[in-house]
Image: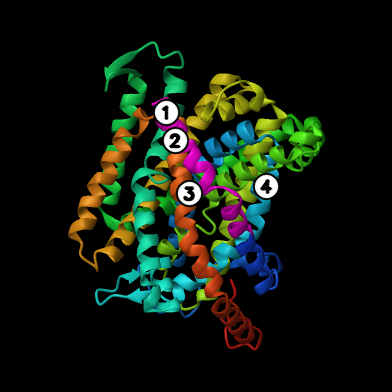
Amino acid sequence: MDAFTEILVKIDDFVWGVPLMVLILGTGIFLTVKIGVLQFRRLGLSARYMLGKEPGVEGKGEISSFAAFCIAMSATIGTGNIVGVATAVVVGGPGALFWMVFAACIGMATKYAECLLAVKYRDIKEDGRAFGGPFLYIEKGMGEKWKWLAKLFAVLGAGAGLLGIGTIVQVNGISSAVTTFFDPNKEHTISLFGADYSIATVFAAIAVAVLVALVIIGGIQRIGKVTTLIVPFMAVIYIVVTVLVLLFNITEIPAVIGEVFKSAFGLDAMAGGAIGAIMLAMQKGVARGIFSNEAGLGSAPIAIATAETNEPVRQGLINSFGVFIDTVIICNLTGLSILVTDSHLIGKEGADVTINALGVGLPFGQQFGAFVLMICLAFFAFTTILGWDIYGERCLEYLSGGKMGPVRVYRWLYILAVLIGPFLTVSAVWTIADIFNGLMAIPNLIALLALSGVVAKETKSYFDRLNSGQIKDRL
């Protein structure tokens, strides 16, 4: 297993090397300039659109705009915000947090562009189903000769959902938190697959798999209802808890912020190791940031294409704000909570790092931190599993030419992957997820660059109409 893990790490380092980071950051910067820093100039409008209902919408789509947003957010607010941030800071140092937030700020433009294109190029089926995503805006926007690129994205998207970010990583995070709370010393074990596992881990795996099956078999309508209820509620709870950690340790914040900047630019490393320290912080920060907010990955547009909306730009703005919530707010709060409590130095990994931050940072004891994180992780990761099932199914539907037989098989394989996820090693799981994420982003980023002119044109047209009063869009 160690040899296999080493091979995966080498592949991961190659995929997430300088070329991909340049492509991700470069695409975000290019789109930011192309749309005139729209993600910041119109941040308030994005928030208003997220909370308000689009006037005059004619039901062109499958689910409400807010439900589509919640499905997209359910897939982003997950273990990446809790376990992923901890992994980035432990491995990449405090500077990883800076690069995570930096990538998110320009990633807001990337998410805006990909969600705009998803709505513009989507198909509305005869039965009223809305179908779209990068595979369609590559095929329809770039032309038939690029269909191979659309298929490549769909293959990687289906694989990422089944083997990486959608199932194994998420349920691994849930089972880890449950086991840490109920059986921290693994005193109650059972032998499975030639190894001993805590009974809490086994029960968590079975429970999550059953609940996932009950929801996803009901399709996107049921998934939309569940995520609309869970995502806003749990996001608020987690934000409140992490803000309390910072308030109880407020005197440590200035020094921590200084350490983040020093680490991000290698100022705390010896001269010879400064470049290496910067690259490690950048690699882990960008990779974990993309894992969390999925800007540039091309996943969220698949859900957004189902939204009841007539305006691609409006939906793009809403989901651009989602990146701000996910990374600039939630991931940042997690990272700062870990750093102000020195939890990244305790010699642990994953959820245990964040559990320690909540336990040490709040005056309620370690058990309280474990309980809060178990609840948050369970709900965040559960909704992420639901969201990624939609992504994987739609990718496979595209590949199969609309045939639903392979999709139904995929659905059951997805449930099986959730069931076995907790019994795989954390390091290997995260590495596989990173590889899929990196490969999946490449076709999507190529399409975003190729269609950037369409994004700029649509943006100008929308705001010309909005400013002239042709669009009366207000709360």
Disc 1/disc 4 C-alpha distance (Å) = 30 Å
Mark 3 residue type: Val
| Element assignment for label 2 | helix
- The quarter of the picture where the N terminus appears is top left
Report the predominant secondary structure element of the magenta stretch: helix
Is tag 1's residue or tag 4's residue first in the polypeptide sequence? 1
Establish if 242 lies above or below 219.
above
Q: CA distance from mark 1 to mark 2?
A: 6 Å
**Residue 110: percent from left, percent from top:** 58, 63
Quadrant in which the C terminus is drawn: bottom right
Residue type at tag 1? Ala
- The mark nearer the N terminus, 4 or 3, is 4
Residue beneath disc 2:
7
Label 1 sits on a secondary structure element that is helix
Write the residue at 40% across / 78% down.
Answer: 140
Nearest the viewer among 52 and 448 is 448
Q: Which mark is residue 99?
A: 4
Which residue corresponds to mark 3? 231
Are circles 4 and 3 on residues that touch, CB within 8 Å? Answer: no
Q: Say whether residue 18 is magenta.
A: yes
Which quadrant holds residue 414?
top left
